[in-house]
C-alpha cells in the first residue's frame, strides 16, 4: 500500500498514458466499491464461527488462509501499456482481495490479549516490522530506477513482482503463527446476550451503532484525517520532487526511503504509548509533520543551495512524524472494542475494523479523485518531462495545504482524546468484574465517570447482560 500510495498515480500518468483525473478515478472508484466489501467482511468475520468452516479454521484465520495466495495478483497492477479499463479492473480486484483478509487481520490484537501493555508490545512489534517494510517499499523502487532507468515501466513491474511474493509469504506466516479467541469462548459470551441480526437493514443499523461510542468517533476522525493527509502527501511527492524541485524519481524514492527511521521511532513510540498515552504521540507527531510541510513549500519557493541536503533533513524529520502517525492509531484501535463490549456485552472488533476501513477507503477515494482533478485543471500534461509554473504551484499547494489541513484537523481532535493506559485499565477491570458476575450497583464513582466519558453512554445503560 505504501508503493501504491507513492507511485500508482505517477505510474498511470507517466507510463500508461492516462490523465491524472483517470488515475484518480481508478483509485477512487475502486476504493468506493471496496469500501462496501469491507462492511460485508466485518459482519461476515464476526459471525463466521457459526459455520462449519469457521469452527474448524477460525472466524478470522479462515479468510486469511484462503486470501493470502491471492495477494500475488498485486503484480498485475504494474503491467504497462494497457488501457483504463484494465487498470480499473486489476486495481479494484486487488483492493477487494486485500480488504477480505485485512479486516480479519486487524481484529487480532484485540483477541490475542486483553492487557494494555501486552497489546502495545504486540502492536509495536507489528509496526516495527511495518516500518522495515515501508523502508523496503520506498528504497527498492529507487534502486530499480537507478539500475534500469526511468524511461520504462519495467522497474515498476519487477518491483511489483518482488513485493507480491513478499506480501504473500509474510501474510501466510502471520496466518500460521497468530491466534484468535476460541470458538467456545465466543459462543459462551454470545450466550449471555440476545442477538439476532439477519436482514441487510439490521446489519447496516448494527454498523451505525459503532458510532455511538464516543472514543471511537474521535479515533475514527483522527485516523481518517491523518491517514488521508498522509496518502495525499505520498500521491504528490514524486510529482513534487520531479516537477517542483527539478530532481529525479530516484531522489524522490530515496527521500521516501528515509522511512527507515520508523524502526527506532517505533521503539520510542511504544515506550511513550505505555508511559504517556496516545495524546502525547498525536501532538508531537502531527505537530512535527505540519512544520515540515511548511518547510517543503519553502524549499520549492526559495530553492536554496545544497537543495538535496536540505530536502534530506526535512524529509527525515517528516518521516519521524509520519512514523508516529502510522504507529499511534493502530495501537489505539485494539482498546476501542473493550469500551464497546462494556456497553453492549459483545465483542464487535470485526465491525469496528470494517467501519474504519470503509470510511477510510471512502475518504481516500474522494482525496484521490480531487487530487487528480486539481492536477488536470491546473494544466498538468501526462507523460511530459516538465510542467508549467501553474502546475508546479498547484502540486506544491496540494502537498502543503491539502495535506496540512487534514493533519491540523486530526491534531485538533486528538487534543480531546481521552483513552490512555490508566483509563483503559479501569475499563478492563470493570469488564472482567461484570463478566465474573459482579453487579453494576457496586461500581464506584470513578469507574462510572470513566466509562461514561469514554463511551458516551450513561453507566446505568451499559452491560445489558445483567438485564
Image (cartoon, rainbow, N blue to C red):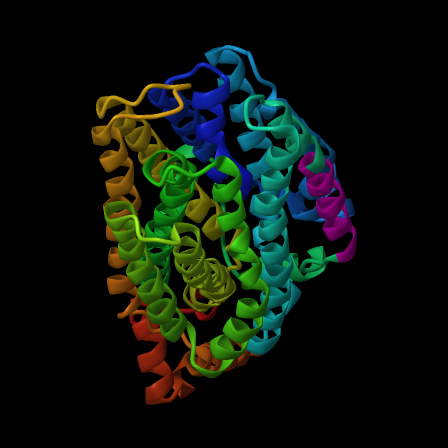
Image quadrant containing the C terminus: bottom left
Nearer to me, 206 or 99: 99
Residue 233, x across and y down, in percent: 37, 45
- Residue at image x 54%, y 62%? 262
Residue 172 is a magenta residue: yes
What residue lies at 63% left-to-right and 58% top-to-bottom? 186
Q: Is residue 317 magenta?
A: no
> Is residue 230 toward the left or the right of residue 400 in the image?
right
Q: Position of residue 285 (x, y in %)?
A: 38, 66
Q: Give the range drawn in magenta.
A: 163-177
Residue 191 in view (yes/no): no
Q: In this view, does 386 lie above or below 63?
A: above
Q: Where is residue 379 in the image (x, y as percent from the top left)?
A: 24, 21
Task: Answer whether residue 10 is visible to the viewer in this image.
Answer: yes
Q: Is residue 351 above or below residue 445?
A: above
Check the image and report above or below for 177 versus 139: below
If the image is split into quadrants, where does the N terminus sit?
top right
Above or below residue 189? Residue 307 is above
Kindly identify the residue that appears in the image at 31 percent across and 44 percent down. Answer: 399
Instruction: Locate residue 367: give its quadrant.
Output: top left
Rendered image quadrant of residue 22: top left
> Which percent across, then down, holds residue 431?
50, 75
| Res 23 quadrant in image | top left
Residue shown at the point (39%, 57%) measured from the top left: 310
Q: Which of 451 and 120 is in front in this view?
A: 120
- Magenta region, mostly helix, strand or loop? helix
Amino acid at each position: 500500500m505504501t508503493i501504491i500510495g507513492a507511485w500508482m498515480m505517477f505510474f498511470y500518468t507517466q507510463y500508461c498514458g492516462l490523465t491524472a483525473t483517470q488515475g484518480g478515478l481508478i483509485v477512487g472508484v475502486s476504493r468506493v466499491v471496496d469500501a462496501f466489501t469491507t462492511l460485508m467482511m466485518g459482519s461476515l468475520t464476526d459471525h463466521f464461527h457459526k459455520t462449519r468452516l469457521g469452527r474448524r479454521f477460525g472466524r478470522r484465520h479462515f479468510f486469511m488462509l484462503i486470501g493470502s495466495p491471492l495477494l500475488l495478483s498485486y503484480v498485475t497492477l504494474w503491467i504497462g501499456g494497457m488501457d483504463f479499463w484494465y487498470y480499473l479492473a486489476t486495481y479494484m480486484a486487488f483492493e477487494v482481495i486485500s480488504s477480505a483478509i485485512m479486516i480479519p487481520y486487524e481484529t487480532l490484537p484485540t483477541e490475542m490479549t486483553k492487557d494494555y501493555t501486552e497489546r502495545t508490545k504486540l502492536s509495536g512489534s507489528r509496526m516495527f516490522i511495518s516500518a522495515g517494510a515501508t523502508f523496503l517499499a520506498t528504497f527498492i523502487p529507487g534502486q530499480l530506477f537507478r539500475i534500469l532507468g526511468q524511461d520504462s515501466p519495467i522497474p515498476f513491474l519487477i518491483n511489483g513482482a518482488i513485493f507480491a511474493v513478499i506480501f504473500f509469504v509474510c501474510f501466510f506466516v502471520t496466518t500460521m503463527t497468530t491466534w484468535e479467541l476460541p470458538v467456545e469462548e465466543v459462543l459462551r459470551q454470545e450466550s449471555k446476550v440476545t442477538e439476532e441480526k439477519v436482514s441487510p437493514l439490521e446489519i447496516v443499523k448494527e454498523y451505525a451503532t459503532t458510532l455511538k461510542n464516543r472514543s471511537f468517533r474521535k479515533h475514527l476522525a483522527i485516523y481518517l484525517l491523518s491517514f488521508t493527509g498522509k496518502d495525499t502527501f505520498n500521491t504528490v511527492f514524486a510529482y513534487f520532487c520531479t516537477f517542483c524541485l527539478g530532481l529525479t524519481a530516484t531522489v524522490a524514492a530515496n527521500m521516501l526511503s528515509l522511512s527507515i527511521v520508523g524502526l527506532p521511532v517505533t521503539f520510542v513510540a511504544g515506550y511513550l504509548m505505555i508511559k504517556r498515552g496516545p495524546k502525547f504521540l498525536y501532538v508531537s507527531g502531527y505537530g512535527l509533520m505540519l512544520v515540515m510541510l511548511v518547510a517543503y513549500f519553502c524549499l520549492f519557493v526559495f530553492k536554496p543551495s545544497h537543495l538535496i541536503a536540505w530536502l534530506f533533513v526535512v524529509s527525515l524529520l517528516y518521516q519521524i512524524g509520519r512514523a508516529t502517525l502510522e504507529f499511534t492509531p493502530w495501537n489505539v484501535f485494539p482498546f476501542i472494542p473493550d469500551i464497546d463490549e462494556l456497553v453492549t456485552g459483545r465483542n464487535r472488533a470485526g465491525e469496528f475494523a470494517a467501519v474504519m476501513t470503509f470510511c477510510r477507503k471512502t475518504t481516500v477515494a474522494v482525496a484521490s479523485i480531487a487530487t487528480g482533478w486539481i492536477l488536470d485543471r491546473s494544466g498538468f500534461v501526462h507523460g511530459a518531462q516538465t510542467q508549467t509554473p501553474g502546475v508546479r504551484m498547484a502540486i506544491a499547494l496540494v502537498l502543503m495545504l491539502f495535506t496540512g489541513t487534514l493533519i491540523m484537523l486530526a491534531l485538533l481532535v486528538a487534543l480531546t482524546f481521552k483513552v490512555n493506559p490508566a483509563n483503559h485499565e479501569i475499563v478492563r477491570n470493570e469488564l472482567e468484574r461484570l463478566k465474573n458476575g459482579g453487579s453494576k450497583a457496586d461500581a464506584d464513582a470513578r469507574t462510572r465517570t470513566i466509562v461514561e466519558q469514554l463511551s458516551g453512554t450513561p453507566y446505568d445503560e451499559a452491560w445489558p447482560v445483567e438485564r
